[in-house]
């Protein structure tokens, strides 16, 4: 696994899929409820709430969205 990908992964949990977003998304889709940490900013992941509502809050508060 590429160390730069692992370093950019926002997940703070000790997980065997850390840095492997495809495996993480597949796990969350079929086994673990909630949105994967990969989708959140580092600030949003720090809330430790993986709901869709939390993801929308993260997008509004922590990401700059280009409006053209």
Image: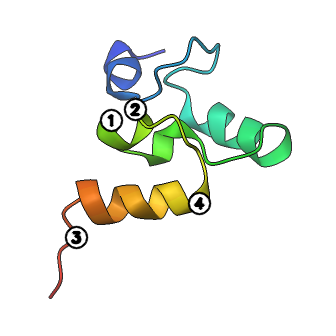
Secondary structure under the numbered disc 2 in the rendered image:
loop
**Viewer-closest of 53 and 28:** 53
Residue denoted by label 1: 42
Question: Marks 3 and 2, Cα distance to the nearest angstrom?
Answer: 20 Å
Residue denoted by label 2: 46
Q: Horizontally, is 1 left or right of 2 in the view?
A: right
**Sequence-wise, which precedes: disc 1 or disc 3?**
1
**Viewer-closest of 49 and 5:** 49
Q: Horizontally, is 54 left or right of 28 in the view?
A: left
**Sequence-wise, which precedes: disc 1 or disc 4?**
1
Relative to 29, residue 68 above or below: below
**Sequence-wise, which precedes: disc 4 or disc 2?**
2
Residue 9 falls in which quadrant of the image?
Answer: top left
Q: Residue at x 46, y 20 (%)?
A: 12
Residue 52 falls in which quadrant of the image?
Answer: bottom right
Crowding at mark 1 (Cα within 10 Å: few <14, some 14-19, many 20+): some
**Sequence-wise, which precedes: disc 4 or disc 3?**
4
Give the label, 3 or 2, closer to the camera.
2
Residue denoted by label 3: 65
Q: Horizontally, is 68 left or right of 42 in the view?
A: left
Q: Residue at x 27, y 59 (%)?
A: 61
The percent position of residue 35, horizontal first and vertical second, equals 62, 48
Question: Marks 1 and 2, Cα distance to the nearest angstrom?
Answer: 6 Å
Crowding at mark 2 (Cα within 10 Å: few <14, some 14-19, many 20+): few
Residue denoted by label 4: 52
Secondary structure under the numbered disc 1 in the rendered image:
helix
Question: Marks 1 and 4, Cα distance to the nearest angstrom?
Answer: 16 Å
Secondary structure under the numbered disc 4 in the rendered image:
helix
Please report contact status of discs 1 and 3: CB closer than 8 Å, yes or no. Answer: no
């Amino acid at each position: 696994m590429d160390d730069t990908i692992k370093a950019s992964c926002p997940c703070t949990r000790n997980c065997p899929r850390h840095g492997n977003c495809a495996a993480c998304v597949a796990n969350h889709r079929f086994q673990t409820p909630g949105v994967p940490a990969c989708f959140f900013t580092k600030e949003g992941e720090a809330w430790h709430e993986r709901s869709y509502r939390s993801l929308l809050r993260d997008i509004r508060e922590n990401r700059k969205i280009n409006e053209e």
